[in-house]
Amino acid sequence: MAGDLSSWKQLEMSADSAATLLLLFVSPRMAAACVQLLLAASLWLPPLSEAAAVAPLNVSRAAAETPSDLWMLSAAETPRRREVSSREINALLDYHNRVRSQVFPPAANMEFMLWDEGLAKSADSWASQCVWDHGPTQAMRYMGQNLSITTGRYQSITDLVRSWYEERHHFSYPNRCSGAVCSHYTQMVWASTKKVGCAVRNCSNMKVFGSTWKEATLLVCNYSVKGNWVGEVPYKRGKPCSVCPSSYGGSCWRNQCSPKTTPR
C-alpha cells in the first residue's frame, strides 16, 4: 500500500541502494543526475486513500493533471521540516468540520472528516520540494490538494487555511463562483471527501509567482476522496444527514454523517 510506513521506508532504502550502485559504475555527472531522478521518483506515490500575506493556490481537474515545473534546491536551501503537532491536527480537523457543518444551503450528505496519516506523509513529501504548485502529477488523479504560503508570522495553523474558507463569499450553490477562485472552499466542503492530511515546511529562496521569497512557510493539505470534479456539485442540499451513505447506519453528528463512535 502506497501510504504504508514500512513500504515507504523500503522504497527509500531501495532508492538509496540503487543510487550507491550507480555511483560505482557511471561518471560523477551522470550519477548525480540519476540520483536526483531516483529520489524524485520515491516522492511520486499516491496516498492511502489533498496571517500575513497568505496566498492560496489551487487548480481544476484538468489543470491538476498537467505536469508541474520543479525548482531544485541547493544543499544550503534544504527545506526545514516542521512537525504538525497533535494539537494542530485537531485544530485543522475541527476547522474543516465546523466549515462543513455550516454550509449554506444545508448539506444532506456531508460526511465527517478524519485525519489520515498516509495523506499527511504524501503532503510532506511534496512540501519538501518547496514548489509553489500542485503535485506530484500522478497523485493528483487520486486526491485533492490545497496549498497556502506565508512570509509572515501566524498565531495558529488555522490562520493558513482561513483564506480558503473566505472564498465562500464568492461561491453560490450549486457551482457558481463570482471571484477569482472558489476551489479551495469547495474542496473543503466536498461531501464525499472524508479524509485529510497536512504538512508544513519552512522554505528558503522559494519561487512564488515569479518572485523569490527568502523565507516562507508552506502548508500542503491532501484530501481523499478527490473533490472539485468538473460538472459536479460539492454536496446535495437538504436536511442535514437525510441522505447519508448507508455505511453510517443513520448516525449524524453536528449536521454530518459520522461514524457510530463519537469522533475525537
Image: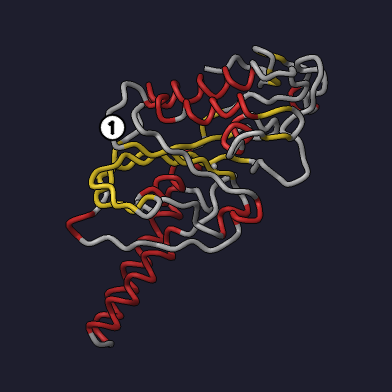
Q: Is residue 75 left or right of residue 194?
A: left
Q: Number of callouts in the render?
A: 1
Quarter of the figure with residue 89:
top left
**Location of residue 215 in the rendering, given as x and y in whole percent from the top left corner:** 24, 43
Q: Residue furthest top?
A: 254
Q: Eyeballing the image, is 159 above or below 3?
A: above
Q: Is residue 143 left or right of residue 242?
A: left
Task: Confirm whether residue 118 shows in the render.
Answer: no
Q: Eyeballing the image, is 138 above or below 147?
A: below
**Location of residue 50 in the rendering, given as x and y in whole percent from the top left corner:** 54, 42
Q: Eyeballing the image, is 117 above or below 44?
A: above
Quarter of the figure with residue 254:
top right
Tell me the element at label 1: loop
**Residue under the image location 25 percent in, 80 percent down:** 23
Quarter of the figure with residue 182:
top right
Q: Is residue 130 left or right of residue 195?
A: left
The residue to which callout 1 is attached is 152
**Residue under the image location 76 percent in, 17 percent down:** 241
Name the kind of residue labelled 1 in the image: Gly
**Residue under the image location 37 percent in, 50 percent down:** 208
**Location of residue 167 in the rendering, given as x and y in whole percent from the top left corner:** 57, 29
Task: Confirm whether residue 10 shows in the render.
Answer: yes
**Location of residue 10 in the rendering, given as x and y in whole percent from the top left corner:** 40, 59
Front-most of residues 1 and 28: 28
**Residue under the image location 17 percent in, 57 percent down:** 76
Q: Is residue 226 left or right of residue 237?
A: left
- Label 1 crowd bin: few (<14), some (14–19), many (20+), radius 10 Å: few
